[in-house]
Amino acid sequence: MTNTAVTSSIVAKETLAILKNKLSFSAGVNRDWEDEYTGNMARGYAPGATINIRKPSRYTYRAGRIAVPQASVETTVPLTLSQGGADLNFTAFERTVSFPSRSVENKINAAVATVVNEIDRQGLALAHTATFNTVNPAGALPNTQALALQIVTDANARLDEMAAPRDGERSLITNPRLNGALIQGFAGLFNNPTKISKQYDRGMMVDSLGLSFAMDQNVDVHTNGTQVVAGTNVNGAGQTGAAITVVGLGGTITRGTVVTFPGVFAVNPQSRVSTGVLAQFVVTADLLAAAVSIPISPALTPTGAFQNVTASPTTGAPFLIVGAASTAYATNIAYHRDAFTLAMVPMWKPEAGMGAKVSQQSSDGFTVKVTDFYDGINDNAIMRIDVLFGWAATYPELAVKLYTV
């Protein structure tokens, strides 16, 4: 039998193929910003390098003939890169006789699984803390047909209200328990026999109801603080912006908690017409009891081109927390691809003669670098797998959390 040497190029190709196949949440997000880094490839990238993604300006409609010039206001969202990876160790024996063997393949799979897990974990953690739209506040698992249809259609309806396109780019990432509950809930629903067969064979939800389904064990868990659902009163009329003043809290509030304010309804981002649903906001920092200011996202904006609510909060009335106090919820996420951005970019490579062999493979916006070097003391070949990536919540209004307990 002819043996094939373990080379960085072979491992890089294997690694890239496995990585693309294993990603779930990351596979359905926006990937358009890798090109921002291409011009700097010769210089390499420092971990933590940041770009600011511009969001388009918005304007208000003018009625009538007389022009009303408006200033163009651009907003930006930072995307910061970080480096990570996993490292492989091949003995001289494995290099000589074992590649491409099951042993080496298992090593590559295990290493790539670690990398994929971290990329998706960071993305889903961002989705948890950045997404403010939330459905199924009681957290009941939808294991009946009525509940399964309700939770999925509620998520789609909220995306519709936020003007998310119906362009085939919507996804739903579930944790294992929600995946199982939806399969049970949709079991009696009339559907394409091929889809039902796939769900039966794989035990996984298949694309349905305008959503691409995937299951991910990294779906983040949010635990509400001790503050009761009906919070303290709003303290002051006419409030706007990214912090709302209230009477001192009676308990704690954790980052990622979703709140609503009295008299504040969400509006369609294009027409600015009320959706009839209370606007939801995500708390951006942990708060202790007696705190008098709640930091929120998005900023509460009742007028102008970036209007997102009908009015400022009613003073003297309590704000409300979504979910129950001291309760943990899985933050399953339905989203349009433009809600979140993942950039995975090429890295600097050492020049020939520096004692390492390097292969960098890119495909469909995914990039993996594999570096091969030798440990002469132990007669081992070491390979490091590196990725350079960053996440940003570019349009979090195009995402919805589905709470389950």
Image (cartoon, helix red, strand yellow):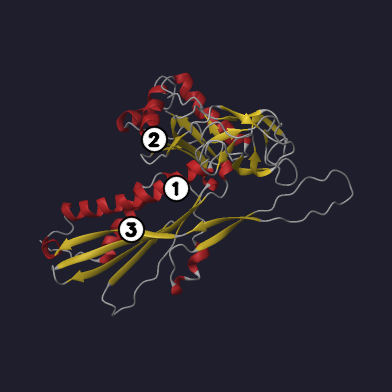
On the image, the x and y values in percent for residue 313 come to 70, 34
Where residue 64 sits: x, y (%)? Answer: 88, 44
Q: Are marks 1 and 2 in contact (CB under 8 Å)?
A: no
> Looking at the image, which residue is at 53% across and 49% down?
393
Residue at which label 3 appears = 85
Q: Residues within 10 Å of mark 2 (few under 14, many from 20)?
A: many
* Image disc number at residue 26: none
* For marks 1 and 3 on the same chain, the one whose residue lies earlier in the sequence: 3
Number of other residues with Cα within 10 Å of mark 1, as a class: few under 14, some 14 to 19, many 20 or more: many
Q: How many marks?
A: 3
Q: In this image, 5 relative to 22: left or right?
A: left
Q: Which residue is mark 2?
A: 175
30 on left or right of 73:
left
Q: Nearer the viewer, residue 271 or 132?
A: 132
Q: Earlier in the sequence, mark 3 or mark 2?
A: 3
Q: Is any atom of residue 337 visible in this view? A: yes
On screen, residue 23 above or below 333:
below
Please tell me whether mark 2 sits on a helix, a strand or a loop: loop
Q: Residue at x 49, y 67 (%)?
A: 38
Task: Please name the amino acid that badge 1 sits on.
Answer: Gly
